Amino acid sequence: MTDRPEALAGVDGVDRSGRTALVTGSTSGVGRETALALARLGADVVVHRRDRAAGERVVRAAERAGGEATFHRAEFADPDAVDALARRVRADVDPLDLVVHAAGAHFPEGTLVDAGAARVERTFAVNHLAPFRLTTRLRDRLAPDVRVVVVASRLHSRADGAFDVRSVDGYDGLAAYARSKLANVLFARGLADRLDGSVATACHPGFVPDSGLWRNASLPVSLGVRALSRLPRRLVPFVDTAAEAAATPTYLAAAPRPPDSGAYVVDCERAEPAPAATRPGAADDLWAHSEDLTGLTWA
C-alpha cells in the first residue's frame, strides 16, 4: 500500500507546476505530509512552523521530491508574528495559489493571549484567529482561483456554537479544541462567501495519535493517545498515519474538480457537518466576532 497522500487521494497524476502553496504547521504530521505531497506534484511550497531546524528538514525533503520550498518561522499565538509571516510571504509570493491551514494545537490549561484587539483563550487564538489573521493579511496576494483548505476535525460536533473566548473560567481543553475546530468549519464557509471564483473548504483529515498535535495535552489524554498509537491497526481502525490523514487536504488542494466552495469533507468526500456549523448566520456571526477580536476587517 502506498504511503503517499496524493496516491491515496487519487490525484498523483495532477500537475501543480507553477503553483505556489502555503502550508502552515508543515514540519510534522498532516501539514508535513501535505506539503511534501504538493511538492511531488510540482508546486512551490512555503513551509511554516515554529521550529526552524524542523522547517529546514522539510524544505530539503520537498526539494528532493522535486519541488521548490522556503521556510518561514512564526508563533501563531502571537499576532505580531503572524503579521510578520504575512509580510514575508507577501514579499516572496505573488500570487498565492494554494493555502492549507494545517497548524493546530491542543492545550490542557487555559491561558489568555493577545489577539490584536482583545485577549482570548489560546487554543482559539492559535487554531482559528491566526488563520483568520493570516488569510486577511494575504488577501491581495491570493490568486483569483485560490484554494484555501482549513484542516478541522470531527470533534467540531462537540461544540455548541458559543464563542465566549475572552475568559478561561471553567476551562476544558477538549471543549476548547472542539470549539476551535467548529470555528475552522465556519471560517471555510465564511471564506466561500467572500472569495468569488475560489474554493474554500474544511476537512476532517483523520485521527493521528503521533502527529504532535497532542504534545501539550494533559497527562491522561497524552497517555491515552500514546497508547492508541502503539496498538495494532486491526484493533484501532479509526487511527490513521499522517500520510493517510494528509490525503484529504491534498485532494482538496489538487483535485481537478474539488467539492463546492464551503464544503466540509471527510475521506475525500463531501460530508455533512454538525448542526452548529450549518445554522443560518453562524459563519457571518463568527466572522464579525473574529474581526472584533483581531481588529482586522476583510472589506
Image (cartoon, grey):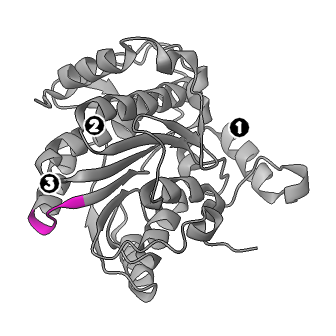
**Residue closest to the eye, 104 or 91:** 91
Quickly name the residue at label 1: 220
Q: Which residues are magenta?
A: 91-96
**272 left or right of 67 in image:** right
Q: What x and y, as percent, mark residue 284? A: 30, 18
Locate the N terminus by quadrant: bottom right
Q: Which residue matches tag 3?
A: 141
Looking at the rendered structure, the secondary structure element under dot 3 is helix
Q: Hey, what amino acid is under mark 3? A: Arg
Q: Nearer the viewer, residue 168 or 130?
A: 130
**Whole-percent x, y for residue 280 in the image:** 41, 11
Task: Using a 10 Å C-alpha cutoff, classify the residue at mark 1 as few (fewer than 14 neighbours), some (14 to 19) or many (20 or more).
Answer: few
Label 3 or label 2, whichever lies nearer to me, is 3
- Where is 117 relative to 216, above or below? above
With 171 as the anchor, is 79 left or right in this view?
Answer: left
Dot 3: within a 10 Å radius of its alpha carbon, few (fewer than 14), some, or many (20 or more) residues? some
- The secondary element bearing badge 1 is classed as helix
Residue 65, image x, y percentages: 46, 84
- SS at circle 2: helix
The amino acid at mark 1 is: Pro
Residue wearing tag 2: 132
> Separation of disc 2 and disc 1 at Cα?
31 Å
